Image (tube, rainbow, N blue to C red):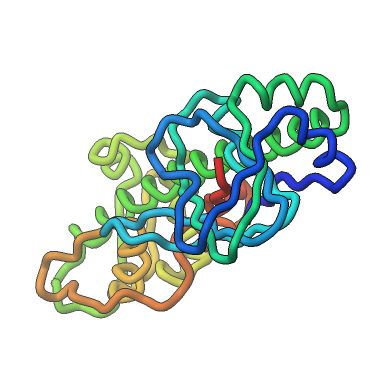
């Protein structure tokens, strides 16, 4: 989980000249996902939860934060809508800043400037890693679905495979390096076993139920009757990718902005 920016009491004392002290009750939201970022908060006392809406619109807690935590600075500095919400979990007192007043404070407090610079750099790096990870997940989904589409029988649990690298590239639009990388990752996950690469040929053995379970984590619909396998309780595709060899990718982390 990406760490939130936290400041000590010495920095907080200086911030009183720029912010307005506010109290918030349990269950209230001080930041809403999707809204335009206009304010920054620094927690003086109490606790809050960083929450993100899932595909059904339900809030999922992704982090808990407390005293000294700065909330909302990423959205203000990047001039972007909020990507998460902040919900109060214990009676909370915070300093609230407008974008302009917080910028003024940052300029005049060197320690705060340094902390924010490091935090913003880390968050941007995490965002980039998440984009790279998403790209690999999408490529693996395309390659995995190709393997399922050409299997000899929908009732087969396992079978040998002999595929054309060029044909996979033509049908998926992926280049050969990415296709080979995807198949090697499947091999490391024990989904495609004993893979061999000879010229433009890919040979080995496929475990179809395991492949389907892995692909379900990145959106494979599994709408064929023989593909109705319960979602695996294993790690997500993004986490699986993070465990694989270079190039490494990490699961996207979520922090308040």
Q: Residue 17, how many percent across, how many down?
A: 77, 29
Q: Residue 65, how many percent across, how many down?
A: 65, 58
Screen quadrant of the N terminus: bottom right
Please tell me in which quadrant of the rendered image residue 199 appears: top left
Q: Residue 89, how many percent across, how many down?
A: 54, 65
Q: Nearer the viewer, residue 189 or 231?
A: 231
Residue drawn 46% across the image and 51% down it: 29
Left or right, residue 12 beside residue 50: right
Residue drawn 61% across the image and 57% down it: 92
Left or right, residue 180 beside residue 256: left
Residue drawn 48% across the image and 39% down it: 177
Q: Nearer the viewer, residue 182 or 240?
A: 240
* Residue 59 appears in view: yes
Please tell me in which quadrant of the rendered image residue 63 appears: bottom right
Q: Nearer the viewer, residue 53 or 106?
A: 106
Left or right, residue 152 beside residue 170: left
Screen quadrant of the C terminus: top right
Q: Residue 107, how many percent across, how many down?
A: 79, 20
Residue drawn 35% across the image and 45% down it: 165
Above or below, comparing residue 136 to residue 73 in the picture: below
Q: Nearer the viewer, residue 182 or 79?
A: 79
């Amino acid at each position: 989980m990406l760490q939130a920016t936290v400041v000590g009491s010495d920095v907080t004392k200086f911030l009183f000249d720029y912010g307005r002290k506010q109290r918030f009750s349990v269950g209230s939201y001080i930041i809403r996902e999707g809204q335009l970022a206009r304010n920054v908060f620094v927690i003086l006392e109490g606790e809050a939860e960083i929450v993100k809406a899932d595909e059904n619109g339900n809030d999922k807690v992704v982090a808990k934060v407390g005293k000294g935590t700065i909330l909302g600075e990423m959205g203000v500095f990047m001039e972007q809508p909020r990507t998460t919400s902040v919900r109060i979990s214990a009676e909370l007192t915070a300093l609230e800043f407008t974008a302009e007043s917080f910028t003024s404070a940052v300029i005049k407090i060197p320690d705060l400037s340094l902390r924010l610079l490091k935090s913003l750099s880390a968050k941007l790096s995490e965002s980039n890693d998440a984009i790279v990870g998403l790209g690999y997940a999408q490529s693996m989904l395309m390659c995995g679905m190709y393997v399922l589409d050409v299997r000899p029988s929908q009732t087969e649990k396992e079978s040998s495979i002999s595929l054309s690298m060029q044909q996979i590239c033509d049908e998926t639009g992926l280049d050969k390096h990415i296709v080979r990388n995807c198949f090697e990752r499947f091999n490391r996950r024990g989904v495609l076993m004993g893979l061999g690469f000879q010229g433009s040929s890919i040979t080995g053995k496929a475990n179809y139920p395991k492949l389907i379970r892995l692909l379900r984590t990145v959106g494979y619909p599994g709408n064929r009757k023989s593909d109705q396998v319960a979602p695996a309780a294993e790690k997500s595709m993004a986490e699986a990718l993070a465990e694989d060899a270079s190039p490494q990718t990490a699961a996207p982390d979520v922090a308040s902005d």
